[in-house]
Image (tube, rainbow, N blue to C red):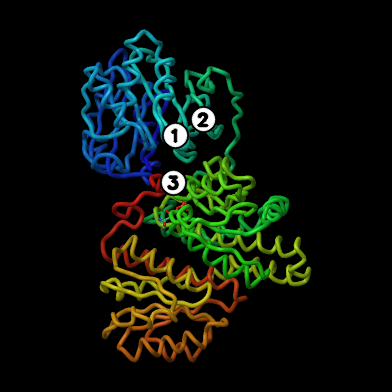
Amino acid sequence: MCGIFGCLCEGAPKVLLEGLKRLEYRGYDSVGIALINGDELFVEKNKGKIDEFILGLDEARLKGEIGVGHTRWATHGAPSKENAHPHLDCSKRIAVVHNGVLENFLQIKEELLKKGHIFSSRTDSEVIPHLVEEYLNEGLTLKEALVKSMERVKGSAAIAMISTVEPERIYCYRRESPLIVGISERGVFCASDIPAIMPYTRRVMVVPDDRLVVLERGSIQIEDLRGVMYKTEFTEVTWDLELAEKGGYPHFMIKEIFEQPRAIRDTLKIPTIFLDKAARLLTGRIYLTGSGTSYHACLSTSYTASDLVGIEMRPMISSEFADALLSLESSTVIAVSQSGETADTLNAVKHAKSKGAKILGITNTLGSSITTLSDAYICTQSGPEIGVAATKTFLTQLVALDLLLLRLGLISGRLSESAHRSITHELEALPGMVEQILRRADKIRDLALKYSKKENAFFLGRGANVATALEGALKLKEISYIHAEGYPAGESKHGPISLIEPNFLCVFIAPRDRTRERIIGNIMEMKARGAEVFSVITEGDDELKEISDEYFEVPRANEILYPIICTVPLQLLAYYAATFRGFDPDRPRNLAKSVTVL
Ligand code: M6R
């Protein structure tokens, strides 16, 4: 995933760099900008993070009122100055930034090479400016050349293009990859997401798929590739920019962990009308699919669905979905994705649709591809999540899915009115419980100091807590680089236990639920082999305090809420361990906020 930004306004160089900084979470291995000043195209790009890039810029050369910029997460071609965007044509009149993956670029590149074009990068994206140049040389206008180029390339693309041929315009195009535009008295803007342009305007529009956009001073036009105009309907963003900024916290991740009570409160307010529409879609066989953390929400929910409403829902990792040869006719697929742009999940959705399944999307990103592909969708109310590690969006996915199950239970008659009322009441207590846990974050920080010196850890649980264990392990490994594995506790004795040696860290998810007695057995097995045991337990559980080397207490709750509240100390553990080890938790190596490649 990469971030693109474009602006036509006073002070464009500064706006461009600020916008790119807000998009850095989308990719941070290289960065670049292009500005038009008079009839000159100024381009600067490099490998590395944006702060280093800014330090190396010659301010005197940053001029002009129109520009585009890019933050990169490498797919085709290693992170390097040459592979950084913007990419230019041979005559250096056209600058293009691109987010997406072009499937047929090799074929196009070969054709263009034969025609004498000279390429300077190994990226797929560089074919775009050369293709536009080729069509310009054939006598087409810049717009016609772009349209023809977009018809030629296959794959996903959100692009922004400027050119000295028409120095007063930014041309954009969107296919699959996200693109939004915004307008205000200050100017016109385009970007990969809303927070990037929020300091300059709150009047935004999500560009529909397969549309060309022309940004000029004071106007934004949207049309399809045949030139048919599309009505521009701007909406006013009501949430606060603060949600997308660090607000005094050292990292986005810790800020987002501490935002969880608010995010849950807002998600609990999802109107019943949306939940009912979604619940009514759930007929036939039901599958849940997602990737990474979102898959863990699917796994957890599959247990809750059987428990709460007696309905079987099969969880599937999205990248495995198509290969599982599932019976999809007359089925429903619940696709869970924070970004709504994860390629594996979109692929699973497209496969399911082609086989006749209905799709219910659960996402945090309005206007994302998943919302356009779904028959109905529910938007979690986390607000933008910038840290690469998913935290608040995981908790709100679980809350939204619980709300959905409650409505499904009521509509299908599997849940009585009074059971519905009482569980709803418990859900409403969740923000307070999470607040209570966060007030004791210091205890986890102290433990993290000790555990940050470990090289390995097991996270073990049973039932829905297996999903919590997997999530705890994923969080720890992805940002602290400690090797961590999540496992069903009962399964650990069938092989993994052989890894246990004195002081091997075992984190047990051991709340007071139906799994507790058997988890105690698993703890004893690990302790007998010298493991160092840290347990997440229900407050006041003296027996578990006694047998664990360390413990963290969560409030007593209904069983279905434990996957939500037991996750919070594990998020904190991962965060503090990463910082003690000297790593930036917001920007783990090799990762990007959303993974848009298969
Ligand atoms: O945007 P999505 O929820 O579809 O993303 C799926 C995964 O890539 C994501 O959850 C990933 O595992 C997180 N970085 C984990 O913290």
Q: How many labels does the image show?
A: 3
Q: Is residue 575 above or below residue 217?
A: below
Circle 3 is placed at which residue position? 343
Which mark's residue is nearer the viewer, 3 or 1? 3
Circle 2 is placed at which residue position? 182
Which mark's residue is nearer the viewer, 2 or 3? 3
Q: In this view, does 402 lie above or below 307?
A: above
Q: In this rendering, would 457 be left or right of 297?
A: left
Mark 2: give few (<14), some (14-19) or many (20+) Cα within 10 Å.
many
CA separation, marks 2 and 1? 9 Å
Question: Front-most of 540 and 318?
Answer: 318
Circle 1 is placed at which residue position? 191
Quadrant location of ligand 1?
A: bottom left
Q: In this rendering, would 177 be left or right of 123?
A: right
Sequence-wise, the earlier of marks 2 and 3 is 2
Sequence-wise, the earlier of marks 2 and 1 is 2
Sequence-wise, the earlier of marks 3 and 1 is 1
Mark 3: give few (<14), some (14-19) or many (20+) Cα within 10 Å.
many
Amino acid type at circle 3 is Ala
Name the quadrant containing residue 156.
top left
Mark 2 lies on a secondary structure that is strand
Q: In this view, does 281 lie above or below 113?
A: below
Mark 1: give few (<14), some (14-19) or many (20+) Cα within 10 Å.
many
CA separation, marks 3 and 1? 20 Å
Q: What percent of the width, then of the height, locates residue 426?
A: 66, 70
Q: Are marks 2 and 1 in contact (CB under 8 Å)?
A: yes
Q: Are marks 2 and 3 in contact (CB under 8 Å)?
A: no
Question: Front-most of 18 and 193?
Answer: 193
Q: What percent of the width, then of the height, locates residue 141?
A: 41, 11
Amino acid type at circle 2 is Gly
Name the quadrant containing residue 417.
bottom right
